[in-house]
Image (cartoon, rainbow, N blue to C red):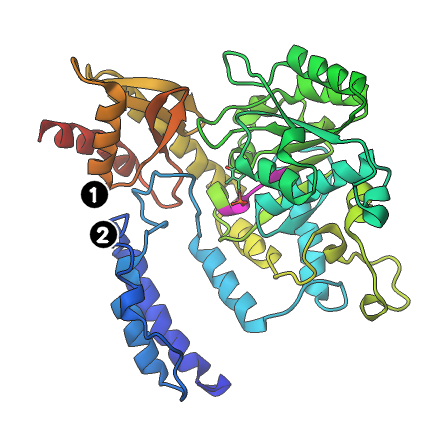
Amino acid sequence: MKYSDYERWSKRVAEWAQRYLTTIADRSVRAPTDPGDVLAQLPKTAPEQGESMATILADFERIVPDAMTHWQHPRFFAYFPANAAPASMIAEQIVSVMAAQCMLWQTSPAATEMETRMVEWMRDALGLEPHFQGVVHDSASTATLTAVLTMRERAYEWRGISSGSAGEKPARIYASAETHSSVDKAVWIAGIGQDNLVKIPTNQEFAMRPDALRQAIAADRAAGMTPAGIVLCIGGTSIGASDRPDEIIEIARDEGLYTHVDAAWAGSAMVCPEFRSIWTGIDGADSIVFNPHKWLGAQFDCSIQFLADPTDQVRTLSLRPDYLETLDQDTIVNYNEWTTPLGRRFRALKLWFLLRAYGLEGLRTRIRHHVAWAGELAEKIRTHDDFRITTEPRLSLFTFQYAPPDTHANEASEALLKRINDDGRTYLTQTKRGDDFVIRFQAGQFDCTRDDVLSVYDILTELIKE
Ligand SMILES: *Cc1c(COP(=O)(O)O)cnc(C)c1O
């Protein structure tokens, strides 16, 4: 295929895309595919000679769509959403055509400056104070890793960069057990180690206990270790639990610790002022991450990290070999110095398209609907004798169990979940509450309707009758 054929084949793909997106609700949400099915259809070796685009696209249609889980399906209620609003899809198409490396201002002036402005738009949209700056990463995991690396280097006064951490006292990071596994992975990669990630007990609301945090820090100092930072969670992945920034950041200030707030999912809901009480005190944070690629509608990958002051992070991550110097340009920003990879995609374009195509009010309306409909569904499930709500809705996320009389609720719930997902009309996942197996529901798909959400009740009651 040549550049001059681009229009022809992209039109073909656009036709396929329109069909796919307008009929997606007729598909099974999760593919009824067995492990190895796709592998068996792919030749063992790459072709020696080029093939026609017609053949490639025909094979794509034959092999791939039916063997995918459809994340843009309106009855996808598993995990968290990975929304891709149509306007953001179009932006991604343009980005893939220009295919620029956005590591330096000079390699991508418009991308760099648009990134600055989009971070400001989002900061203001979330109601954060104007001192926050920020950067767009691929994922929240990367943002959290950069924050943990910054915590380590602050604690070691940047000796880790030059000499490694072998001669240092252990750096200690504090988080509750409700925080995401990306925090555990970040401490592994940062060379801090799992044993130095201190999991602070939570209260009945599943928020980190301030008294327990103070005690843990004091005990670590007494033992000669170096407290380095605290990771807070707002809207945890399991049941949507949140720590209290107002309480925890006060302790961080007293102790001179760096704070990073993981609001990967719930951050999108902060475009609605009425939900902001879950992160009261947020403006005191050093670092905050949220994923516009989850609930908001910017296609994956798009994760924004806000920084109260980027100096420490840039000091941790910037590296300027001669070949990356931009001559006579001291005032420009080179975003690779804020992140771990050098090469960077033009991720701000899809935010620009998204925010302009729907407006903040359009995005707020969607999120408000999702929260309201999830609440309605929880109430409906609660009225049924054989179900119990195990965690109350937090934004649009709640959990429940199937507990008919004389059965074991864990086994009954697990068996029902399997039937729901084999049925294919909707897709839910599970989590654990202590030893309990609970079914997890969240609403957030960009195009889902109230009927889509409430249909889950009909599917549940139909399946348990069988
Ligand atoms: C999804 C999620 C993450 C991980 O996000 P990625 O962008 O996939 O790395 C981290 N924390 C929370 C709370 C999440 O919901």
Q: Amino acid at mark 1?
A: Asp
Residue drawn where x is 54% and y is 52% of the image: 356
Q: Which residues are magenta?
A: 289-293
- 323 left or right of 458 in image: right
Residue 422 - label: 1
Element under disc 2: loop
Residue drawn where x is 51% and y is 47% of the image: 293
Q: Are marks 2 and 1 in contact (CB under 8 Å)?
A: yes
Provide residue 252's location: percent of width, then percent of height.
75, 22
How many angstroms separate mark 2 from mark 1 (CA)? 7 Å
- 12 left or right of 96 in image: left
Question: Which residue is more in the foreground, 66 or 145?
Answer: 145
Provide residue 3's location: percent of width, then percent of height.
50, 84
Provide residue 83's location: percent of width, then percent of height.
44, 48
The residue pinned by badge 2 equals 32
Residue drawn where x is 82% and y is 70% of the image: 323
